[in-house]
Amino acid sequence: MSRRPPRGEYIETDTGNKVARKATLVGTQNIMLGGKTVIQPEVMIRGDLVRSVPSSSSSASAPGSNTAVAIGRYCFLSRGCCLRPPGRLYKGAFTYMPLRMGDHVFVGSQSVVQAASVGSHVHIGAKVVVGEFAIIKDYVRILDGSIVPPNMVIPSFSVVAGQPARVIGEVPEGGHEAFELRDLYKTVGNNPQPAAPS
Amino acid sequence: MAPLTPYTYIQCPCSDPSNLSYSRASDSGSPIDGNPGFDDEEHTFDPRAPRSNYSLYPLEYLLYCEDCHQIRCPRCIAEEIATFYCPSCLFEVPSSNLKSEGNRCTRSCFQCPICIGPLSVTSFETQPDPNLLAAPDHAAAPHSGPYALNCSYCHWSSAEIGIKFDKSNGIHGQLAKLRNGGTTRLTAKERKERRKDILQSGGGGGGTAPGASGDTGNDQQAIDMETQFTNLKSFYQGQLSESTSGGNGLSSLGDLGFASPTSLSRIMSIYTGGSLHDKKSKSRVGSMREALDPNEGLIVADLDESAAIEKLHSEGIDGTVDTEQLLNQPPYLGEPHLHGRSRFGSELRPIPYLLRTKRSKRCPVCRHIISKPEAKIQTTRFRIRLIAGNYVPSITIRPLNLNDNNGAAGTPLPPTAPLPDTLQPLKPAHFLLIFKNPIFEGVKISLATPAKTPGRFASKVTVLCPQFEIDANTDVWDEALKDDGARRRGAGGGRKGDERPGSTQGQQRAEAGKIWERGRNWVSIVVEVVPASLRLDTLPTEGPEGEKVDMSPLKEDEDVLEIPIFVRVEWEVDAVGDDLGSSLASSRDKEAKEKRELAYWCVLGLGRVSQA
Ligand SMILES: [Zn+2]
Ligand SMILES: [Zn+2]
Ligand SMILES: [Zn+2]
Ligand SMILES: [Zn+2]
């Protein structure tokens, strides 16, 4: 509390998001934050890479349909990571598809995520590359330095590592609580609180 | 060397057989009487013993049986498969399909044989085409074949092994009929008809699959494993039926040979799922001849490897496969035959995904279910999940800075601070052990450690406060209400002098018999270690009983300072609505309180000792 800078390092929104002033959010109108999400400095979110081909059900006029990146609650985007919607040829034309992320997703520093969807309670380590259109289900732990190939599906309760990434283990029953990011959320921001004693 | 993150591993009681019998006794009698802890204290648990590898687990991996009041680990629990599913398409596979289709996904889910990345079906038409990009009107044009399986990681394509598909669906079925190189393979029905033809035509040099005519190989190579198996099977069936007639009453030793009908029908019932087993076989005697030509299933080993050598010359080592790639290959019955199989990358095949399972877990002693996931694949909920972390106190280790003379002295390093690289030998180091109580009763903890760690390089260990009590894990709402106030106090950079019993002038000194700090449901204590020197010349020349001392160089991880510590947790519970054994105990106890106890070894890994 003593040496708080005159202007906070973070912008704290009404819904409890803590967005670093030094983060780069491109196309903010296409980025949805669920609340209580931390975005650290040097993070980049490419909201500008929005779907260019209307979806098949021609619901392009519906509000919110041009969301490029949707992030749930209590996500933590570490310094220097990048969220980028995946893109591909669709019926002959190149288009981006939205990147959807659930709650309690941790993205380690300097990781690049181009998944189609990331479930809830997912831990992505540092320097990880998640390839385009990968689907990561709930309770998945991706270890540091992994490269998840494009289109890979990672089922729930997988521990994944390697280049290319493969399932190397299972998350044990007692390991579910470790994915909770509520406590981590409190430790950053303009008024950070120390971590719990244990 | 990478710095070591401090760890706590707990030993499951199943590593000691007497503990399992203790648990059994507790079912019938009082759990307090049969105390396993006292026996255990007689011998010190050695975390470096080869056996210990198999009994030490982080707390998250342990379950807890509420009926036995005991820790259970992945090694002793009994598993039951609830659901089979494909890890790629996430479809459930009914167990009836497993018998007929095997344990791999039969949809279009394949892994790359080179890098095991996922393969996706792509049309040859989808190559980036600038005209298409410019004019999206073409988009409506549907893809047409041929299709191939492509790896998006290493860009391997099934076209490299000559496999292309006419349709984009049912890849598994199409692949089963295709050999590498694109030649088709006989289906079971076609093979049967072919056999008939060959038999009718006198069985000359037949057996060549029609699609394989382009191959340079001889007749034998054209017979794939499945064909050979069918040939052998029908040959032996014929032999068996012939031998039935020729019974001469002699049995005994002749029956045990390879050529005896009894052995043969037994072996065949193994390989054909019991369908060939018939009761008459017992009475069969005599011997039979073996297969003599390819139509009867005989394949002469092809020892001529000149083609393989030639290929090795032209393709080099890069064209060959490694052991891991070979091991990942599923058995493929369409292979020509076993000799010289899969030496080259061109012989590899896409790997259908192995199925994965959801499993429930039972206590090995009382057979109660202690973990049970919902059977549906898309849900991550559990019906039952008795994890040890809800019953056993967790132990967190944090390095403590006591010797520093600047203002930071006496403050534990924050969890985010970089860990000291190594421990200095012969220099006392301090660690905070934070015990957190997960249960809703207060617990009494007693700790015991050997004064010196087991192993060649014995470090000195002192637990400054081996006995203490931790308050109950109070209601979550109480915590939420108190949370703000407690956090505020802690916000000032760790200056919480008033909370520390042993504090003087804001700084704190570690005192024997006193805890370091206390919170709602946690207590921290100090442990002092004096790491041993890792130099071999400091070892005594003789052991205490005159035996020779191991003077071999430092072994792997021998520099890690590990402390075995025996933890005993005691608490009292209301004896209401409990099992038979506890009601006996409560009748003696007037306050209707039942004493509970849990005792186990754990090992604390503190860090690496510097080898300077
Ligand atoms: Zn066990
Ligand atoms: Zn599948
Ligand atoms: Zn590959
Ligand atoms: Zn049990």
Image (cartoon, rainbow, N blue to C red):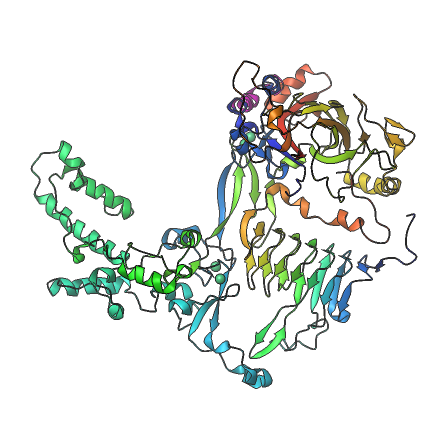
Left or right: residue B612 compared with residue A38: left
Question: In the image, residue B544 lies at what x, y percent?
Answer: 57, 15
Magenta-drawn stretch contains B29 = yes
Q: Nearer the viewer, residue A67 or B575?
A: A67
Question: In the image, residue A156 lies at what x, y percent?
Answer: 58, 52
- B230 versus B280 height, above or below: below
Q: Residue at x 17, y 50 (%)?
A: B237
The quadrant of the picture occupied by the C terminus of chain B is top right
Question: In the image, residue B50 lies at what x, y percent?
Answer: 52, 30
Q: Nearer the viewer, residue B2 or B354?
A: B2
- B257 versus B129 height, above or below: above
- B301 versus B217 height, above or below: above
Count of marks overlaid on the render: 0
Q: Residue at x 21, y 43 (%)?
A: B265
Left or right: residue B143 compared with residue A157: left
Q: What is the magenta range?
A: B21-33
Q: Quarter-wise, where is residue B285 in the image?
A: top left
Q: Nearer the viewer, residue A80 or B367?
A: A80
Question: In the image, residue A54 lies at what x, y percent?
Answer: 64, 77
Left or right: residue A17 compared with residue A142: right
Q: Can see residue B375?
A: no
Magenta stretch, main secondary structure, is helix
Q: Residue at x 49, y 51 (%)?
A: B356
Left or right: residue B443 compared with residue B143: right
Magenta-drawn stretch contains B389 = no
The quadrant of the picture occupied by the N terminus of chain B is top right
Q: Can see residue A177?
A: yes
